Each structure stands twice: as structure tokens, then as C-alpha cells.
Image (tube, rainbow, N blue to C red):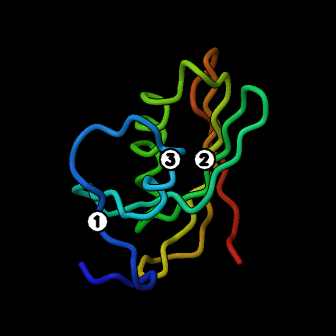
Amino acid sequence: MSDLAGPGIVPCRPGRVVNYMAAEAQQCWYSTAQGRWRIVNHEFHYDVLVMQTQASTPALTDQIVRQLVEVHGERFAEILVYVQPDPGGAGTIVRRARWTRNAAVEYFDFPGA
């Protein structure tokens, strides 16, 4: 797959990720059978993690949330994931997913810029 997001963004190394907040985790594309995604930025405040991502399709949101929760779910009580279309992807919808320890994942779609 060509790199439509700019030079220097390469596929991530295969294998288990131990920290999606590490610098190297923001410098590559994660590949799935349904498309690709990457971390653009993150912030955390107390026990809330906010991840900004790009994905080839918003349908990857569930998988992105599962992967982030698997690694960071014990440390954070709430994880917010914003999934924006990648420059090579289709659509303009931005999907927000909100995971908490005590509830199901909630989704909200809003128009992107």
C-alpha cells in the first residue's frame, strides 16, 4: 500500500504492542484485513486517555478500541478514541468511541472538516 499520508510513515512491526503512547507507536501504520490505522496524537489526564487516530475506514473503530483497551485498560478508567479518515481513505466522518470500565463502548459520529 502506498504511503498517502506523507513520507516516513511506514508499516508497524508485527507483534504485540506494549505501549501505544510510545513515540515509535505514532510513527507507523497498523495493518488489518479491513484496512490500516495509525495514532496521530494522544493525551492523558488523570485516569482518562484520549487518542487521536487516522484510519482507512471508520469500521476499524472497534478493533482500534479493543487493541488500546487490551494494553491500557487497566491503567485508565476511560479511553476516548477519535477516528478520522486517513488522507487515502474514503469519507469525512469522524467517529468518537468512549470506553469505560463500567459500561459498553459508546459511539458518536460527526462530520469532519
Picture coordinates of residue 44 (x, y %)?
71, 39
Tag 2 or tag 1, which sits nearer the N-term? Answer: 1
Q: Position of residue 56 (x, y in %)?
A: 40, 68
Residue 81, which numbered label?
2
Task: Tell me which residue sits at (59%, 22%) in the image.
Answer: 75
Task: Identify which residue is drawn at 67% across, 28% down.
Answer: 78
For disc 3, the marked residue is 22
- Looking at the rendering, which quadrant does residue 3 occupy? bottom left
Secondary structure found at label 2: strand
The kind of residue on which mark 1 rests is Pro
Q: Residue lying farthest right?
A: 45
Vertical order, 3 against 82 (above or below): below
Q: Amino acid at mark 2?
A: Val
Corner quadrant of residue 13: bottom left
Give the alpha-carbon distance from disc 3 to disc 1, as whole Å.
Answer: 16 Å
Q: Secondary structure at mark 1?
A: strand
